[in-house]
Amino acid sequence: MSTQPLRVLFCIGINQNFFDLPADGITIGDVWQSFVSMMDQLKALPGITFIGDIDDDAHLVGPSDGWPWTCYILADADSQETVKAGCNLLRTVEVGSNGVKLWRFAKIEARIGRPLTVREDVELPD
């Protein structure tokens, strides 16, 4: 049996701090710039194959601390360590120039599964 990649849904929520901007010398534009950087870094992680994304800031207005999330990124990953590295980007990507990290404005949760296919151990009727 070959090793299948992990199918990962990165679920991203925006928190109240984003909606309180501008504050502390940080603007909404600063957060967006950092968010785009985070997404680019996630897509470029070794072991990540980007499949697609979806953003629903038109139908979900205000903070999202859980389902439904504001946006989603669907990817394949080679390991749980790679998924963890993707989530960790919110802890490391800076917003502005004063050391504030992206997690102050957004949160991320990864759901890990497999592509929806019939498992090899399932016998289908004729």
Image (cartoon, rainbow, N blue to C red):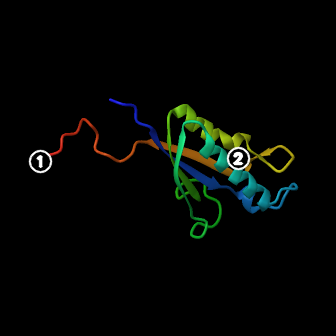
First of labels 1, 2 by sequence position: 2
Instruction: Residue at 82% x, 61% y: name it.
Output: 22
Give coordinates of residue 123: x percent, y percent.
18, 40
In the picture of the structure, the residue carrying the numbered disc 1 is: 126
Q: Nearer the viewer, mark 1 or mark 2?
A: 1
Looking at this view, name the residue that lies furthest to the top: 1
* Left or right relative to 101: residue 125: left
The CA span between labels 1 and 2 is 51 Å
- Quarter occupied by the N terminus: top left
Q: Secondary structure at mark 1?
A: loop
Give coordinates of residue 121: x percent, y percent.
24, 35
Instruction: Residue at 50% x, 35% y: name it.
Output: 78
Q: Residues within 10 Å of mark 1 (few under 14, many from 20)?
A: few
Nearer to the camera, 99 or 18: 99
Q: Amino acid at mark 1?
A: Asp
Q: Amino acid at mark 2?
A: Trp
Give coordinates of residue 83: x percent, y percent.
56, 38
In the picture of the structure, the residue carrying the numbered disc 2 is: 103
Instruction: Residue at 65% x, 60% y: name it.
Output: 63
Give coordinates of residue 17: x percent, y percent.
74, 56
Picture quadrant where residue 57 is located: bottom right
* Left or right relative to 94: residue 47: left
Instruction: Residue at 40% x, 36% y: name it.
Output: 4
- Number of numbered tags placed on the structure image: 2
Looking at this view, name the residue that lies furthest to the bottom: 58
- From this view, report whether residue 70 is shown above or below residue 119: below
Q: Secondary structure at mark 2?
A: helix
